[in-house]
Amino acid sequence: MAIYHCRLKVLSRSLGRAARPGGATRRSAVAAAAYRSGETLYDLSQNKSFSFHKPDVVHTEIMAPEGAAAWVFDRAALWNFVERAEKRQDAQLMREVELTLPRELTLPQQIALVRAYVGRQFVREGMVADIGIHCPKAADGLDQPHAHVMLTLRRLDPTSVTGFEATKERDWNETEEVREAVAEARKRFNNTGLPEDKAALEAAEARRNINVWRAAWAQAANAALEAAGSKARIDHRTLEKQGIFRTPQRYLGVAARHIEKAYDYLKERLTQWISVKARASLYAELEHYKRRDPAKVADFILRLSDMAEDMAADYRRPPPPIPEVPLDR
């Protein structure tokens, strides 16, 4: 069954947390590209090689605007140039788009879908896109095809020593016109709370790049499914907008991979904990009644013991024979 998943995030050098002893001190675009492509790439800025063996990587390619230099299509060169173009320790390095691909499509159809979507939405606007399609096994044992698309944040500049323009392309985040329209619509709705102002805010929000890209992915995937003769469809809208009244589930991400492994252990530990708590509660209750009427409590315990012996005897008895039923010939 085709599902909708289109997640966008920006990767920066900053870890966002304290570095672990012996671990990485910052993030690297080269390391990210090595992982998503399953290759070995050398990071010149850190004098360090990153190597990942990922059998689930089924396709990789780099797409760039027309007229791009040859080095742009060399993965190691591309992301080392990206690293060189950024000076700040907390600089943003690239944008990543994660796409779940429909199982109903073959690998060539999935590749064509990703190419068409990435070309129209990102490369045509001037971004360089590094695509990695992975196909691991899901929890149900079937394929889980998905794509990682790494996007540059600066326009190419053949006259620059870094290969990129001196400043990032801010319109790829949001145009000034859309930013102002969203801010104005949100302020108006916060002041009035009127349904028409809420609709105006939603219309303004729909023009934001992230929402345009998310809607475009649903349209592109559905067009590909229809062309493949599949009746499956995906929808980028919220459950409420789709008229589906179901509590949304929290996205688990990487944690979901470990749930199945931890389930048996947690179940055993939780069962033990409940047993201990229940036994302690029973003992406390017995002590309470023992202080009130010791003789009655003693008689009750004896009766419980007799009941336990009767139950054990019933389990030890062989089951009655199953009567033979003649089969119709």
Image (tube, grey):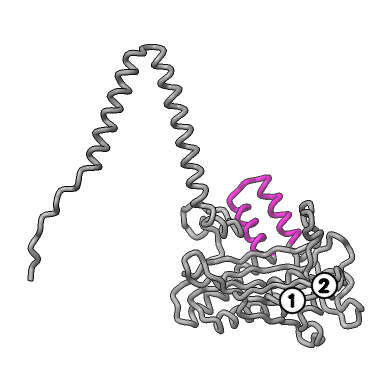
Establish if 186 lies above or below 151: above
* Vertical relation: 253 (above or below) 227: above
Of the pair 94 and 262, the residue shown nearer to us:
262
Q: Residue 63: percent from the left, percent from the top?
A: 71, 82
Residue closer to the observer: 291 or 236 = 291
Q: Which residue is mark 1?
A: 40
Residue 80 painted magenta: no
The residue drawn where x is 46% and y is 72% is 232
Q: Position of residue 281 (x, y in %)?
A: 45, 27
> Identity of the amino acid at label 1?
Thr
**Quadrant of res 314:** top left
The residue to which callout 2 is attached is 43
Crowdedness of circle 1 by 10 Å Cα count: few (<14), some, many (20+)?
some
Q: CA distance from mark 1 to mark 2?
A: 10 Å
The magenta segment is: 179-208
Circle 2: element type: strand
Q: Nearer the viewer, residue 304 or 40?
A: 304
Quadrant (top left, top right, bottom left, bottom right) of the C terminus: bottom left
Q: Is residue 143 left or right of residue 180?
A: left
Instruction: Examine the rendered structure and indicate whether residue 219 appears above or below residue 91.
Output: below
Residue occupying the point 62% across, 46% down: 193
Residue 38, by quadrant, is bottom right
Q: Residue at x 70, y 63 (%)?
A: 9
